Every structure is written in structure tokens, then in C-alpha cells.
Image (spheres, rainbow, N blue to C red):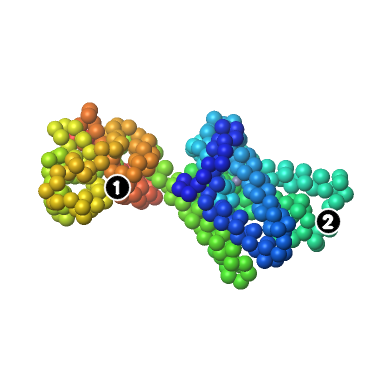
Amino acid sequence: MKWAWRIGRFFGIDVSIHATFWLLLVFVGWSHWLQTQTAAGVIEGVAFVLTIFLCVLLHEYGHALTARRYGIGTKDIILLPIGGVARLEKIPDKPIQEFWVALAGPAVNVVIAAALLGWLMVSRTLAPAEQVTVTGGPFLERLLVTNVFLVVFNLLPAFPMDGGRVLRALLAMKLDYVRATRIAALLGQAVAVVFGIIGLFSNPLLILVAVFVWVGASQEAAAVQMRSAIGGVPVSLAMVREFRTLAPSDDLARAVQLILTGSQHDFPVVAGDQVTGILSRDALLLALAQQPQHTPVDRVMTREFVTADAQEPLEAAVQRLQGTPCHTMPVLHHGKLVGLITAENIGEFVMIQAALHQRGAQIVAQPPH
Ligand code: ZN
């Protein structure tokens, strides 16, 4: 993720902190300075935020280490001002595994809260409940309340909260995965609307949370729909078959002509049978601003691109495409260029699959040329 800095590696998982997180610390320090006008007040405020984020980090490790038990690795854990994210390499296949992975995070906060409560009771220092809120009262009591809040918030049965994953896992034991996700995502959007309305009349911060929840719910639904639409399908079914190519010696003027007379954005550059590069629209525009129009395209094209095989699973190809800056991927069959995979085409393919899915139909496969 951009703007995230690695702070360390624990249990074999990198932990990064997003740049905006430091802004949050500055903001908290500043507001405590305004309230207390003492350095001790500032340090206490900042220390409290850092302690909460330690609890959030432990929560994420709850997810990551449970996933590891099912053989699923974690790319990294990122701490953002709104909370943490453990980026699992994939979502568990079996609903029961997702159920436990999702539940393990909030379970960590339950343990922390119980330990704090136990300590406060044993040491007989527990403050009366009416003195304690998230923002006021003794340090440990506030930490206790915050952890309880984390449990309740995360267990709301709606995406993108952990509770949404728990709900999806439970629904997916009875329904198909896409429908289960859609229900959990719809609930997420309903929760977002409620947060937004409450936020309008009370705390504006809730509006921010509402936006975050809404976007998270929609993204999850879209990602699952995409995975289900392209799952089990070969590249050849979704590739663009009618396209133009450039020769390495063609000049920029020729590329301009092709862009203006067709709807293609990126062009494979082909020498003989071999794809030697890709000329993207962005690269072309950049070159037109700096170089004469008779410059050959092989001086401008990118040579760093990934290819797909017509027979390989579309899902794997799309994953590779998403990992590169190039939006177009040449598809080869026995080493020969037979098609292109583009982001737009995949988008269309997903929409068509969704429409067909409603009446249980499928795209009819065509044999490669
Ligand atoms: Zn969580």
C-alpha cells in the first residue's frame, strides 16, 4: 500500500503504519495540549492512542494466526487511523474456516478486556462505571471500555466488519457464496446509512465511519461477484479477439491513427510472431508531447508486461494483470498472439456473467482461431 511504512516483522508478518496514522497522533497530542496545557496531558493522550493501536494490532494477529492454522498466509498487517487490516493471501474456502478466522480478531479484544477487568478487580482499583467513558476517566478503565467497544463494533453483522464475515460464513453454509456475500453487504450498507443519519445529528466522525463501511461493503460484494464470474473459466473465453497490432518500426503517427479510428487503447507491438512490447495510450501521449511523430514505437513502448496463455484459468491471469501497471495483457497460444485481456473487457465479462447467472445460463465457449 502507498504511504505505508514498515515498522517491523513479528511472527513472520510485516507490520506497516499508514502515513495518516501519524497525523492522528499529532491531532490527539494537539487536542490534549489544548485541554490540559501540560506535557503530561499530551503524553498520556498519545500513549492512550498507541495502546489502543497495540490492541488493534493484537486483534489483527488474531485473524492472521488463525488463518495460518488453515494454511493461509498473511501478506502484511497495516494500521490505519480507522483501524487495522490483516491482508490475507486468500479468503478461506470453507465457510467454517472463515467463521473462525473472523471471530478470532474480536476474541482477542474480549481476552484483553477480561484481563483488564480481572486486574482492576483484584487490585481493587476499579473506578465506578459512571466515571468512565472512551474519552474520560482513568487510563486502564478507558482501555477496558475501548476494547469492549471494539468487540461490539467489529461484531456488527455487516460488511466490512468481522461480524459481516461471520454472518456470511453462516449464510454460506446454506446459500451460494455470492448471495451470502450480497446479503451481508446489503446489511453493511444499511448500517452505513444508520451511522450516517446518527452522525448528522451527533458526532460528525460517525459520518466518516459510515462512508468507510459503505465503501467496504460495496467493494467486498464486487470482489466476490468478480471472483465468482471469472472462476473456472479459461482466458480464451474472455479475451478480446479483434484487435490491431503495431510493428516495431511503425511510427507514433500510425499509433495515433489506430487510436482515433478504433476503440483500442493499448497496442501490442509484434515483430514476426513475437510480442516485443506494448504501447499504451498513456505512453503514447507522453511521447507525443516530447518527441517527433516519426519516432518508431519500439523506442516508446514498454517492454515490461505479463502474458497469459489462452488455456490457463482467467482468475490467475487477472490476478497477474492487477499486479502490473499495464492494463492490457497479450494472450498467447503456442507462443502466438491470439488475443488480449484488458481491464474493460473483464469488467464487461463480469457484467454479462451476472446477467446470465440470473437465469442459470452461461457464456457459450468459442474455440480459439
Ligand atoms: Zn477484525
* Residue at left offset 15%, top offset 54%: 261
* Residue at left offset 30%, top offset 49%: 344
The residue identified by callout 2 is 127
The numbered dot on residue 162 is: none
The amino acid beneath tag 1 is Asn
From the viewer's side, name the closer residue of 89 and 137: 137
The residue identified by callout 1 is 345
SS state under label 2: loop
- Residue 361 point in image, percent of width and height: 35, 45
Q: How many angstroms separate mark 1 from mark 2 (CA)?
A: 61 Å
Label 2: few (<14), some or many (≥20) within 10 Å? Answer: some
Q: Residue furthest bottom?
A: 201
Horizontally, residue 322 falls left or right of residue 368, namely: right
* Labelled pair 1, 2 in contact (Cβ < 8 Å): no
Can residue 280 be seen in this snapshot? yes
Whether 37 is drawn above or below 363: the answer is: below
Q: Quadrant of the C terminus?
A: top left
Residue 277 location, quadrant: top left
Dot 1 or dot 2: first in sequence order is: 2
SS state under label 1: helix
- Residue 22 point in image, percent of width and height: 57, 53
- Residue 228 point in image, percent of width and height: 42, 42
- Residue 103 point in image, percent of width and height: 63, 42
Residue 40 location, quadrant: bottom right
From the viewer's side, name the closer residue of 280 and 316: 280
Mark 2, ligand 1, within 8 Å: the answer is: no
* Residue at left offset 68%, top offset 42%: 108
The amino acid beneath tag 2 is Ala
Whether 309 is drawn above or below 43: the answer is: above
Horizontally, residue 196 falls left or right of residue 307, namely: right
